Image (cartoon, rainbow, N blue to C red):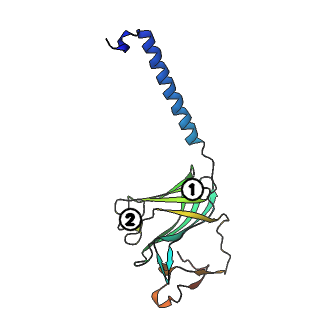
Amino acid sequence: MYPLQKLSKAVLACVLLICVATTVAHTQVISKAHQQKKFINPTGIYTLQGKQKGDETYGYFGHVYVQYSAPQKIIVKFYICKGYMSYSSGRFYDTLLYQNNTAVYGPTENDATCKIIFTFYPNRVVVDEQTADFNDGCDFGHGVVANAIFRKKDQQKPQPKRNETILIFNPCLVPNFLKTANQLIIPLSQPYH
C-alpha cells in the first residue's frame, strides 16, 4: 500500500482543505497587489535617443509628449523614426484612455490589428506595438516598429507658447534640400507632427 492510502479520509480532507485555502489566499493577495498600483501622473516629455555619427542618426529615436487631461484620459503626441538609412517614421496625436498607468492606441484607419501599449513608470514609458504586419503596421512608414523605452526628460506639461519657435534636429522632418546640419526652425503655431 502507498503511504497516502493508509491515511484516513478525514486527514486527506484536511490536507486538501489547507491546500485550497492557501491557494485562494495567495490569489487574493496577488489580485489586490495588481489593483493597488500607485497612480503615476504621466504628464511630461519622453525621449528615445539614437546614436549620432556625423550627420546621421543610427537606430530608433523619437519622443512622446503626454498630458493628463481628465480622469482616465491622456493626450498623446507620439513620434518615432527608424534612423539611417531609410529614416522611415510613424506618428500620431490622440486622446487615450488611461487606466492602471497604461494607455492603448489603436486600431488605426488602415490597420484593424494595430495596438500600441504605453506602460508608464516614474521615469520612463515602455511602448509595445502589436500588429499583424510589422512592415506597414499601425499606418507607420515601412518597417517602423514602435517597441522601445522612452526616458522621461521633463515632468512639465508640454505646452508650447504662441508664436514660439523650436529647433528640430530631426532628419525625418526636414526635406533633403533643407538638410543643412539637420536643423529647421518651425513656428509652433504650425503643426509639425
Under circle 1, the secondary element is: strand
Name the quadrant containing residue 133.
bottom left
Residue at position x 46%, y 17% in the image: 15
Q: In the rendering, which numbered label is found on residue 120?
A: 1
Give the camera-side residue of 24 and 100: 24
Name the quadrant containing residue 150.
bottom right
Amino acid marked by disc 1: Phe
Under circle 2, the secondary element is: helix
Quarter of the picture holding the N terminus: top left
Q: Position of residue 115 (x, y in %)?
A: 43, 58
Q: Residues within 10 Å of mark 1 (few under 14, many from 20)?
A: many
Residue at position x 37%, y 14% in the image: 3
From the viewer's perspective, tell me whether residue 161 is left or right of residue 82. right
From the viewer's perspective, tell me whether residue 5 is left or right of residue 33. left
Q: In the rendering, which numbered label is found on residue 83?
A: none
Amino acid marked by disc 2: Gly
Q: Residues within 10 Å of mark 2 (few under 14, many from 20)?
A: many
- Residue named by callout 2: 137
